[in-house]
Amino acid sequence: MGELFVVASPIGNLSDITIRALEILRSCDRIACEDTRHTSVLLKHFGIEKPLISCRARNECEASVKILQVLDKGEKIAYVSDAGTPGVSDPGSLLVAKAREKGHTIIPIPGVSACTTLISVVGIPFKSFIFEGFLPQKGLKRQKRLQELLSTGCAVVLYESPYRIIKLFEELVAVEKILGLDKKGKNMQAIVGRELTKIHEQLIRGSVAEVLQKLSTETTIKGEFCVFVTIN
């Protein structure tokens, strides 16, 4: 049977890749990836040349069939998403499930994740957290989900795009009022990581209202965001 290596890739700085990940990428027969163009940059940087198979969210079902056919021949395939750990708010879960059903060996190659990278520098004591990833993009379902998450009392980690980051903090301010935190002498504290491990890495801290104000002063918002929110 074949072997499927689920390989974590850098979220920004290419030097964040592990030695083991590079060994797997160099020794495997093929590399399946979320975006062949993106992964080609990573491979070129480390002088690696391998046949690539596209396996992104929109074609994961069809691509999994092709990858399974290769695994059935006993080949070794590494799967990488664009950044971070596959299957964590990224494609990969379906591929892993289908490969396991066929009896192929699944081997995780751990590495960087935006979630744990941000958590390591929040500097706020907490016992547990909920990793939600991306919220629904529109409607009452989005705000309702935020309210459900924060009502648990756990810290929450979210991913958000530059197009909805201000909307997210407007919603957090609204949820803070709905939960009546001011009457309890509490508020929501947030730490926002932008472009983590990249050249323009930035951490923004403060209450959700303060973070909203800081973001609202920017004329152009760029970068990918990881957000940690907790009630103090």
Image (tube, grey):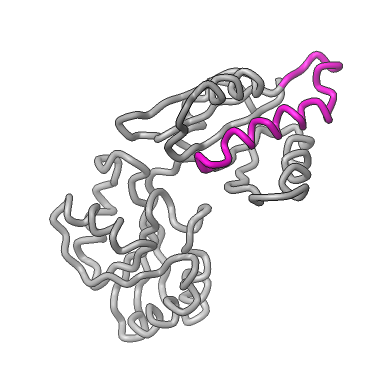
Which of the 4 image quarters holds residue 154?
Answer: top right
Q: Position of residue 28 (x, y in %)?
A: 24, 68
Q: Is residue 45 magenta?
A: no
Left-right relation of 95 to 50: right
**How would you classify the magenta stretch by its main secondary structure?**
helix
The residue drawn where x is 43% and y is 52% is 85
**99 or 133, nearer to the observer:** 133
The residue drawn where x is 21% and y is 56% is 43
Q: Is residue 172 magenta?
A: yes
Total numbered circles: 0
As drawn, 198 above or below 43: above
Q: Which residues are magenta?
A: 161-187
The residue drawn where x is 37% and y is 47% is 111
Furthest residue in direction left, as rendered: 47
The residue drawn where x is 42% and y is 76% is 63
**49 or 154, nearer to the observer:** 49
Which of the 4 image quarters holds residue 129?
Answer: top right
Q: Quadrant of the C terminus?
A: top right
Left-right relation of 101 to 156: left
